[in-house]
Amino acid sequence: MRLDHEEAKRIAREQGRTLTGVLGRAGVSRTAYYSLRRRDNILPRTIRDLAAELGIEPERLLRKTPTPLTYERRLRRAREICDRFPGTDFHNVWHTLTLLDLPPVERLRRSLRRGRA
Amino acid sequence: MAAPELFTKREQDFLETLLDEGVEFMVVGLAAAALQGVPAVTQDIDLWFAHRGDKKMIEALRKVGVSYIPPSDQNPPLLAGEAADLFDIVVHMHGLGSFEDERAHAKIVEVGRIKLPVLPLERIVASKEATGRPKDLAILPVLKDALRVID
């Protein structure tokens, strides 16, 4: 698994930023970034060794991008909660479940981004 | 893992310095709710300090170029400095116990590489109920619905 430099540049551009600017704000040095870019595999050895021991691809140990199945399960769970607690707003439940699938840093990022928009 | 783009380097240093220097505080309000999964919107991060304006706090703030401005007349206490632009000081948490009592039950939430003490959602609900302010009452249904999911 390699760092997708072109994708990083493209996303930065979409946001009206430069990759250099993003690196600076993220506190990531250019040296560290370009060192990572040169590597054939950016996964930590820990993950690769663990995966090898388990006899699986390392990607299986990483959080996946949501699939239609993810949304089906979330929908089912939201309906269960709304049925169990009459008067509960479906959208509040749905968005909470969505946020719970994200790390806390991302939850707060979304909250602040919308609050400061 | 760093927290790219959420905190600037200065803001990250601000939080880490408070923790490293043993300043007792926790994240409260809607930022605390958001960290726990509540779909709530906020403009800043409210911090509740055990000993607002004490020597340890002032010294930690000084290290990251932040000044503590004590309350005066009708002005609330403020943190002044680029590293603290995102943060507000909470003076009083309505409907809750002492800082020490609440801190004992705080959740530790990892925000990037920082481990922040955070007021649990059920206590956030209690404080919003107690204030009775329209803006707090307005968000209560969202907080309570989220609590049903998280419980």
Image: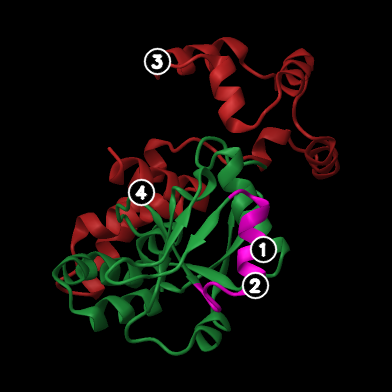
Q: Are marks 2 and 1 in contact (CB under 8 Å)?
A: yes
Chain letter of the green region: B
Q: Position of residue B41 (x, y in %)?
A: 30, 52
User: Tag 3, which secondary structure?
Assistant: helix
- Tell me where the magenta segment starts and ends, as one range: B49-65
Q: Which residue is mark 3?
A: A14
**What chain does badge 2 belong to?**
B
Measure the C-alpha gap from mark 4 to mark 2: 33 Å
Q: Which residue is mark 2?
A: B55
Measure the C-alpha gap from mark 1 to mark 3: 42 Å
Pointer 4 and pointer 3 on the same chain: yes
Residue at 85%, 39% in the rendered image = A49
Pointer 3 and pointer 2 on the same chain: no
The amino acid marked with disc number 3 is Glu
Task: Tell which tag, 1 or 3, sits nearer the viewer.
Answer: 1
Q: Which mark is residue B59?
A: 1
Measure the C-alpha gap from mark 4 to mark 3: 21 Å
Shown colour of chain A: red
